[in-house]
Structures are given as C-alpha cells and as structure tokens.
C-alpha cells in the first residue's frame, strides 16, 4: 500500500507541483490550501507524512504543527519562504522532523520525504526481536514506538525516539553532536547542525521533565557531547 502524504500550501501552483512529483513516485497525495482544511484532511485521511507551509492566510503553520503533535506522531516537514534560523528552531522545537526553505528543488524535497518515511516506517513494522530498553524508569519499545518514563507516557516524534534510543543504547558513553546528527539525520554534519541537535535534546528534556523543570536524564558533557548514565 502506498504512503499517504498531505501537502498544505496556500500557493496552489506550488502544492500542485509537489503533488505531481510525489504522485510520480507512487505516493497517494492530498492537497490543502488553508490551515482549517488541512486539519480536517488530517482527521479524515490519517496521512503518513505532512508537508506544512508556515505562512498561511488563516492559521499559522506552527499552530497546525502544534495541533498535529497533540495527537499524531507521523513525520512533518515544514515549508517556508522565511530564511531566519529562529523559524527553523521554532519548528523543530514544536516537533517538526525536517525543514526546507523556498524556493527548493522538487527532487530534493522528494528525497527528504523518502528519508522521513523510511525512518517512520521502521517503527510500524513487526519486529520479532522484541527491541526493548528498560532501565532507570525509562521503558522504550522499538516495535510499537511506545515510550514511558517513570510510568508516564512520552509522546515522541520519530527523531526524538531515535536520539533517546541511540543514547540509551550507548549508555555510559559520550556521543558527540556530530555522531548524533550523522547517525540520526543521515546527513553530513555542518556547524549549524549542532543547533539542530541541541533543540531536539532540549525538547526531550522538557518532555521527560515533571512540568516544573527539565529532566537531567540526558547529561551534557561540555565540549564533547551527550550521554546517559549506566
């Protein structure tokens, strides 16, 4: 069965071009041109991935992302004409999995869609090995993508789950930002990549915290990277 992809962009020409490229790759595509229609389409279609424009006439794209993350874990790629790095940080903090600025090469966008779907799909496949991490109050099930900490459910995006799993799998060892980025994102590490890693670590700490303060489950080793204690 082909994956379902939702495209939200108020510029119909852009949405239609993206849809054409994705349909040529065999994906099932739904387009929306307003935030409200996108939210309705998400409820109706249950997509496997969403491409969300940031600048919309009715509802801010970040608000749409917030609503999605309240209920769903599928990958979200943000599309924007803005180039400010703060907007990228905002999107990643709210739970976006990737971010691409306009104008973009449609082939690059298709490649990023494929990468996100590959990452997401592996959590929905049956795995006979029963991949479980259970220690220090953390319980992670790689088969079901379920995660609890101190008996409280954590709703993690696929990338957040990957980061936490990698750190726990290597507990006691320091993992550098470069290692994290290249193993999780499967891309070459650049200077700004460290900010991307920091945002996701901060988001994980906030989710693992008790509401009053961030969790210190993930330790920062200054100038080196991050680790989880044994």
Image: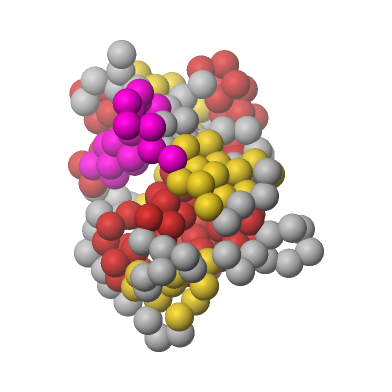
Q: Residue at x 33, y 40 (%)?
A: 119
Q: Where's residue 131, x and y in %?
A: 38, 38
Classify the position of the N terminus by image quarter: top left
Which residue occupies the extreme bottom position in the image?
Answer: 223
On whether residue 63 falls in the magenta region, the answer is no
Residue span colored magenta: 111-132
Q: Where's residue 70, x and y in %?
A: 65, 38
Q: Residue at x 53, y 52 (%)?
A: 135
Image position of 208 with respect to 220: above or below: above
Q: Residue at x 59, y 36 (%)?
A: 68
The residue lying toward the viewer, choosing from 70 and 149, is 149
Q: Where's residue 206, x and y in %?
A: 64, 60
Q: Where's residue 73, x and y in %?
A: 52, 36
Drawn side of residue 63 relative to residue 19, left or right: right
User: Residue 122 is drawn in which quadrant?
Assistant: top left
The residue lying toward the viewer, choosing from 84 and 67, is 67
User: Residue 156 is drawn in which quadrant?
Assistant: top right
Number of numbered tags placed on the structure image: 0
Which residue occupies the extreme top position in the image?
Answer: 1
The residue lying toward the viewer, choosing from 63 and 154, is 154
Image position of 146 with respect to 207: above or below: above
Query: Can you see residue 57?
Result: no
Colour pattern? secondary structure
Query: Can you see residue 179?
Result: yes
User: Residue 136 is drawn in which quadrant?
Assistant: bottom right
Drawn side of residue 165 relative to residue 202, left or right: left
Q: Residue at x 67, y 66 (%)?
A: 214
On whether residue 125 falls in the magenta region, the answer is yes
The residue lying toward the viewer, choosing from 10 and 7, is 7
Image position of 112 with respect to 102: above or below: above
């Amino acid at each position: 069965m082909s994956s379902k992809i939702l495209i939200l962009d108020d510029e119909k020409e852009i949405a239609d071009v993206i849809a054409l490229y994705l349909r040529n790759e065999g994906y099932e595509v739904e387009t929306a041109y307003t935030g409200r229609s996108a939210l309705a389409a998400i409820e109706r279609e249950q997509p496997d991935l969403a491409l969300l424009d940031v600048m919309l006439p009715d509802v801010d794209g970040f608000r749409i992302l917030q609503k999605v993350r309240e209920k769903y874990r599928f990958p979200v790629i943000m599309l924007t004409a803005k180039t400010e790095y703060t907007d990228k940080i905002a999107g990643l903090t709210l739970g976006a999995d990737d971010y691409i600025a306009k104008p973009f090469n449609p082939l690059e966008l298709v490649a990023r869609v494929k990468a996100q779907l590959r990452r997401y799909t592996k959590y929905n496949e049956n795995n006979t090995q029963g991949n479980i991490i259970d220690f220090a109050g953390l319980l992670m099930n790689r088969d079901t993508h379920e995660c609890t900490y101190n008996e409280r459910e954590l709703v993690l995006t696929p990338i957040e789950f990957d980061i936490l799993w990698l750190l726990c799998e290597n507990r006691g060892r320091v993992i550098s930002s470069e290692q994290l980025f290249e193993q999780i994102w499967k891309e070459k590490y650049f200077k700004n990549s460290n900010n991307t890693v920091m945002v996701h670590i901060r988001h994980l700490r906030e989710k693992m915290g008790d509401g009053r303060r961030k969790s210190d489950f993930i330790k920062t080793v200054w100038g080196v990277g991050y680790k989880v204690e044994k």
